[in-house]
Amino acid sequence: MGLMDFIKKQFIDIIQWTEDADGTLAWRFPMADMEIQNGASLTVRESQMALFVNEGKAADVFGPGTYKLTTQTLPVLTYLKNWDKLFESPFKSDVYFFSTRQQVDQKWGTPQPITIRDKDFGAVRLRAFGNYSFRVADPKLFQTEISGTRDSYGVSDLDGQLRALVLQNISNAIAASGIAFLDLASNQLMFAQALTTQLAPEFAKIGLKLEGMTLQNLSLPEDLQKILDQKIGMGMVGNDMAKFMQYQTAQAIPKFAEGGGGGGSGIAGDAMGLGAGVALGQVLAQNLAAGLQGGAAVAPAAAPAAGVKAEDVMATLEKLGDLKTKGILTQEEFDVKKAELLKKLV
């Protein structure tokens, strides 16, 4: 280099980065054709780290502080350049700054239901979403694996990859935890901890530290939720099939009320539908109980209580309904009489 070229050449004596936008993870100090002056000042602020890269090789890393750049403060870079004595001339090197601030409120979710193994149900398809936070922990690894030589690299550039990483590990996280789906659904903190345990090593592989995860919602597709509700109902009555059929009958009563019971009209139709439902529940319960006990023959369904006919009860209910309509009976009095009559059918 001629003397005039040397004089015209610009040298850098202050290296620093003031973050001017949220979400920037890595930023390359603009070097152009400039070189770093021997003894230049490097300022690394809190929540930052700086990395010197020479000829494509990551060298020295600096944490928060102010440094005078000499052979003593750049030991790895000095070694890479094979300087056998203190360098006194300017040198060229790429300098990258990294934000180590915690990047909060990053969203994750399952666009479609995912299938997981479950010790209670065998397999469950679920949807989930929440958020997480992370920070750059290893600038060398992050620069090598992710940000590379780009002038700037932000959270938005990494968002898709991290979301995919979460989705890939949800099933493994639940399987490794050994926690049943029902326990996960009732304890969101437990679910989030299982995910964090599974994902932390995956984040570390690319130079990131996973600070935490939260679960905001965990749900099943509607068809599976109905099946789960039925299973819960069966679990409530245990092996008592009579109680289970009563439970099923109770579930059907609103449908009879909506559709008029499928027979008759008005109060009589509703009462007949209700009485038929209860009686059918008893018959099915007896048949199922006998089957569970070895398939013994089942006696025909017992008739209503001696001396009481269903037709008489229905007729009485119709008369009571007329009295209520005419204002002779109150609604409360009618309901009491109706309950007494229906008991005689079971």
Image: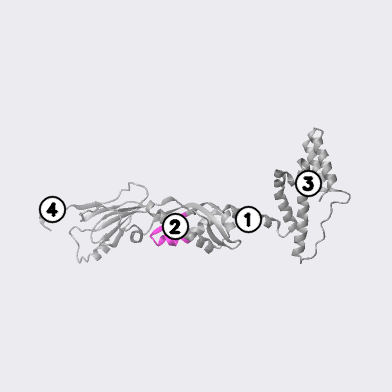
Say above or below: 87 vs 264.
Answer: below
The residue at the far left in this view is 3
Mark closer to the observer (1, 4): 1
Mark with earlier residue (1, 2): 2
Mark 1 vs mark 4, CA separation in Å: 81 Å
Give residue 202's position: percent from left, percent from top: 43, 61
Say above or below: 104 vs 241.
Answer: above
Mark 4 vs mark 3, CA separation in Å: 107 Å
Which residue is under mark 1? 227
Amino acid type of the residue tagged 3 in the rendering? Met
Amino acid type of the residue tagged 2 in the rendering? Ala
Residue 164 disc label: 2
Label 1: few (<14), some (14–19) or many (≥20) C-alpha neighbours in 10 Å = few
Mark closer to the observer (1, 2): 1
Helix, strand or loop status at disc 3: helix
Mark with earlier residue (2, 4): 4
Mark with earlier residue (1, 4): 4
Which residues lie in the magenta part?
198-212
Name the foreground residue: 29 vs 307: 307
Residue 272 disc label: 3
Question: Circles 3 and 1: CB distance less than 8 Å?
Answer: no
Residue at 81 percent of width and 41 percent of height: 317
Left or right of residue 15: residue 105: right
Residue at 84 percent of width and 42 percent of height: 316
The residue at the far top in this view is 327
Residue at 48 percent of width and 54 percent of height: 213
Residue at 30 percent of width and 57 percent of height: 149
Give residue 125's position: percent from left, percent from top: 55, 57
Which residue is under mark 4? 7
Helix, strand or loop status at disc 1: helix
Amino acid type of the residue tagged 4 in the rendering? Ile
